[in-house]
Image: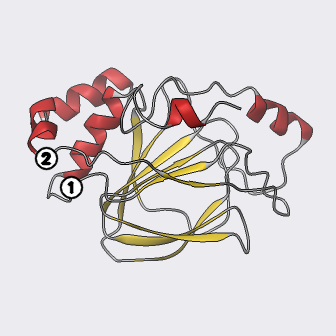
């Protein structure tokens, strides 16, 4: 589904910018998690950004995340859970919006850092960041999005020199998926 079709689908479903205003986002600074290369997992010098309880939990939270991410130029590409195997993406930065349920995610590869995320939380992973679902509630629903023009791949082995070079040349997003140009990402991801 292309961006235009996706955005049209959001508005056709009845979610508007006014709906976001009715349940505004909680203005907060994200936690930062700095990861180093770990075994075969490349990770990234840019920190993972973790917004806790930034979205109010409502029955239509997935649709609201779709809208906010789209407005901020991180169009969603899927809704599902998180894979139960360690992997990373070499072709895109990723945002994981927790729409329902809760999940324990290991970040950084095997024996990395476990983060618990609940409905309303948002994790922003720079390219190369290892992630794997450890446990999750039965109702887990994640909205996965990527900066405009970036599409994800799945890497489950050590990064080759070509993969590392591709990761180094991934374009920085112009905005934070939650708060746009005023958000933390453009200020923190400056390396």
For label 1, the crowd category at 10 Å Cα-Cα, with few meaning under 14, some 14 to 19 and many 20 or more, is some
Mark closest to the chain's N terminus, 1 or 2: 2
> Secondary structure beneath disc 2?
loop
Residue drawn where x is 41% and y is 46% of the image: 78
- Residue carrying label 1: 56
Residue drawn where x is 84% and y is 54% of the image: 158
Residue drawn where x is 13% and y is 32% of the image: 16
Q: Position of residue 145 (x, y in %)?
A: 44, 40
Circles 1 and 2: CB atoms closer than 8 Å: yes
Residue 151 appears in the figure: no
Image height of 154 relative to 164, above or below: below
The CA span between labels 1 and 2 is: 6 Å
Position of residue 173 in the picture relative to residue 117 (left or right): right
Q: Position of residue 33 (x, y in %)?
A: 61, 56
Exactly how many numbered labels are in the figure?
2
Q: Quadrant of the C terminus?
A: top right
The quadrant holding residue 177 is top left
Q: What residue occupies the far right of the structure in this picture?
A: 161
Q: Quadrant of the N terminus?
A: top left
Position of residue 102 in the picture relative to residue 86 (left or right): left
Q: How is the image coloured?
A: secondary structure
Name the one closer to the observer, 57 or 189. 189
Q: Position of residue 127 (x, y in %)?
A: 66, 42
The quadrant holding residue 132 is bottom right
Q: Which label was assigned to residue 23? A: 2
């Amino acid at each position: 589904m292309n961006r235009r079709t996706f955005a049209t689908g959001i508005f056709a479903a009845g979610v508007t910018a006014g709906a976001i205003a009715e349940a505004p986002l909680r203005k907060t600074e994200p936690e930062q998690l700095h990861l180093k290369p770990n075994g075969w997992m490349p990770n990234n010098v840019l920190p993972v950004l973790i917004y806790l309880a930034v979205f109010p939990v409502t029955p239509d939270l997935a649709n609201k995340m779709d809208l906010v991410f789209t407005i901020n130029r991180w169009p969603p590409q899927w809704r599902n859970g998180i894979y139960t195997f360690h992997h990373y993406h070499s072709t895109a930065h990723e945002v994981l919006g927790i729409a329902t349920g809760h999940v324990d995610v290991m970040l950084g590869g095997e024996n990395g850092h476990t983060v618990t995320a609940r409905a309303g939380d948002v994790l922003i992973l720079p390219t190369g960041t290892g992630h794997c679902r450890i446990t999750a509630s039965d109702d887990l629903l994640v909205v996965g999005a990527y900066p405009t023009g970036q599409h994800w791949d799945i890497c489950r082995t050590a990064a080759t020199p070509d993969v590392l070079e591709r990761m180094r040349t991934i374009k920085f997003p112009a905005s934070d998926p939650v708060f746009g140009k005023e958000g933390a990402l453009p200020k923190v991801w400056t390396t």
